[in-house]
Image: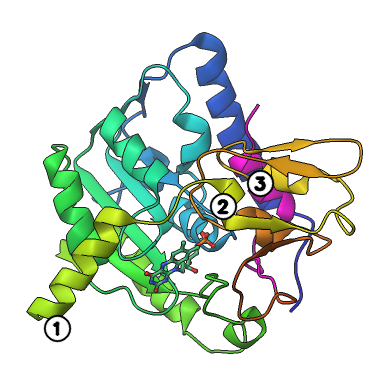
Amino acid sequence: MEQKESMSRRDALKTMGAIVTTAALSTTGLSAFAAPAKKEDGRTAPGNRLIFYFTATGNSLYVARELAGEGGRLFSIPQIIKEERLDFEADEIGFVFPDYAASAPLMVREFVNKAHFKAKYIFSVITFGNFAANVADWWDEFCKAKGLENQYINTLLMVDNYLPVFDMNEQVKIDKKIPDNLAAIVDDIHGHKQFIAHFEQMDERMQGFLKRLQENHFPMEAERLLRLNTETCIACGTCAAVCPHGNFRMTDTHAEFSGSCEYCLACVHACPQKALTLERERNPQARFRNENVSLRDIKEANHQK
Ligand SMILES: Cc1cc2nc3c(=O)[nH]c(=O)nc-3n(C[C@H](O)[C@H](O)[C@H](O)COP(=O)(O)O)c2cc1C
């Protein structure tokens, strides 16, 4: 699959805009953010839209960018979560993140737990690869428990980056109708549609199974989850740069890792040597990154100081 290493000028400017905004917030210590009101054709213009995203392999970043359009502002959750004050106000606030076991990455949950949001229209788009189940209902309930009411929650089928089960070479060949489905979601949100993608086929067995997944999530220590081939690792630091938890350090010869892990697999997918693997994988030679997103974009979104 062709991967775009370099950013287009438009993407570069947009990413820089988000970084500058975040940097400005960091340097002033002011994390409360109020976007100026701006209306067009009776709809709220994307200029007054804040989007918070989490991504490992770029699917959710791509969707977040498409939703931001020319004027919306993008914030990477692994970056913005480090701010002391997390108060956000805008006409529209959105969340974009991958489905992890019919729920959200832990850092996304933590962000919503910590932050305060005020907006007339709140929306979420959850990217998934195979089976979204009741993730929209789960997210709706999760947010409501924090006093956050979504007007719109939808799911978008994309490449499934879960390496224990899927072969990336096979996944990228499947036509998941992403452009059409994404365009429909963008239109819904521009039109302030009220919608929650309810999961209808919920019997008792399914309910129990999903509840266990959502409560237990995954084992969380990087040292238990990841395997490193120290012979092929060249200590290039890519894993360190893409890890949203900052779990990696470089020695002269190879990477070392430890700490709380999302199991997002950003490090495994991005390793140029394929030196990082999991204990069980469908195809250890196949890795994925969304074709509209560069490695640099993922580093900029996730790197920790
Ligand atoms: C730990 C983990 C758990 C996942 N669980 C699910 C799941 O339950 N259902 C599903 O359809 N996709 C699941 N996926 C696939 C991702 O949700 C999907 O590939 C997503 O678009 C990746 O987004 P990203 O490229 O922004 O990281 C999972 C992926 C990972 C890494």
Q: Does the magenta stretch include residue 296?
A: yes
Give the amino acid at mark 3.
Answer: Val
* First along the sequence among labels 2 and 3: 2
The residue carrying mark 3 is 242
Q: How crowded is mark 1: few (under 14 residues within 10 Å), some or many (20 or more)?
A: few
State left or right for residue 10 relative to residue 28. right
Q: How far, Cα to Cα, is label 3 from label 1?
A: 37 Å
Which quarter of the image is occupied by the C terminus?
A: top right
Q: Where is residue 186 in the image (x, y as percent from the top left)?
A: 37, 64
- Tell me which corner region of the image, top left, top right, bottom left or bottom right, holds residue 170: bottom right
The residue drawn where x is 74% and y is 41% is 256
Q: Is residue 276 left or right of residue 14?
A: right
Q: Label 2 vs label 3: CA separation?
A: 19 Å
Query: Dot 2 lies on which element?
Result: helix
Which amino acid lies under the numbered mark 1 shown in the image of this protein? Gln
Residue pointed to by mark 1: 201
Local secondary structure at mark 3: helix
Give the residue at mark 2: 224
**Is 155 included in the stretch rendered in magenta?**
no
- Type of colouring: rainbow
Label 2 crowding class (10 Å Cα cut-off): few <14, some 14-19, many 20+?
few
Residue furthest left in the image? 204
Q: Which residue is drawn at 31% across and 32% down?
A: 37
Magenta residues (range): 287-305
Estimate the x, y position of residue 271 in percent, counting from the top left: 76, 58
66, above or below 2, in the image: above
Q: Measured from the top left, where is residue 120 in percent x and y?
A: 19, 41
Please rate how many residues cluster around mark 3, counting C-alpha atoms within 10 Å: few if below 14, some from 14 to 19, many from 20: many
Residue 203 or residue 139, whichever sits in front: 203
